[in-house]
Amino acid sequence: MKKLFLIALLTLGFAQLRAQEGVVFKIKYLPGKTYKSDVNLVVKIDADVTGDPGLMDKLKFAGITSPVKIDVEMSASGLTQSGSVKADGSFPLDLSYKINKFIVSANGHQAPIPPTISEKEMKIAAHVDKDGIMEVDSASGRKADDSTKVKMKQMMGFFQRQIKFPDNALKPGDSFTQSSPLNIPLGKKVGGEIKINYAVTYKLISIADGKAYFDVIPNFSMDFGIGNTITANITGSGTGKLIYSIKDSFPLSNTGDFTMTFKVTSPQTKVDAKGSITSNSTAAIN
């Protein structure tokens, strides 16, 4: 009995010490694993459109009347298989992604979506180098050029948004913010630019059973102008939850609820809208 008590006491002390020291987090693929990802997205937008009577009559003739209610539902799945480590420390990745459902409707009228969107499967061959950096090699059997590599990374980021954890250890109560400011010039012919600022704050709530639980608070803003005629502003914020597997170095679940406001003005129209986004992504790792 004394031995059991001593073991329990030592175990408890070790666990408390580990919690005080914290854990270093990093998202990375590991060799010899299978990752099955599922993503679900629901978007709802209510928009008031006002403006030139002639233009409004044309929209009405096309079946678009204000207020406009837009609903979007999308689900997608992905499968990633990692191979064995090679002599140079790298290992291969075989990835496939598929959109399972994509539905868009306005005021209850469903928009025609080509069936090929949900029939096509994207296959990607990649590798992870000795430093843990992933590189795309080919897409659908064709060698990937630089632009294709960027697009493929964007697609993979849709399934697994890469979180840049700090290099130092985190313990419950700690938080960090990841910001992504971006300015995109629209060129001389169009004029203007797009300014985007996306920031997400992650707060570590607890560590239990080999998992870390985070609260997620995103904030988003985008402003853009086209010439001197069209301006737009989009802002949003929300809340979410992230569950991270410590042994797998990978998120198992990422959910969020996001609300946004839109304001678009032009010489002929003005749009004021509110929207919501509900997202849910999960990963099963074997």
Image: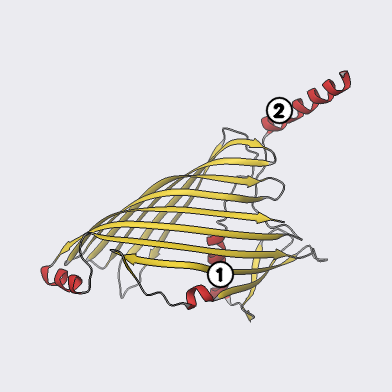
Which residue sits at x=52%, y=61%?
A: 158
Which residue sits at x=87%, y=18%?
A: 2
Contact check, label 2 and label 1, Cβ < 8 Å: no
Quadrant location, the C terminus = bottom right
Q: Label 2 is placed on what type of residue? A: Gln
Q: Label 1 is placed on what type of residue? A: Lys
Q: Which numbered dot is residue 98?
A: 1
Image quadrant in which you'd find residue 277: bottom left
Image quadrant in which you'd find residue 160: bottom right
Quadrant location, the N terminus = top right
- Please tell me whether mark 1 sits on a helix, a strand or a loop: strand
**Residue beneath disc 2:** 16
**Along the line of sight, the residue nearer the viewer: 265 or 51:** 51
Farthest left residue?
A: 53
Instruction: Indicate which disc, 2 or 1, sits on the residue closer to the N terminus.
Output: 2
Asked if 182 appears above or below 167 in the picture, the reply is: below
Asked if 213 appears above or below 179 in the picture, the reply is: above
- Please tell me whether mark 2 sits on a helix, a strand or a loop: helix
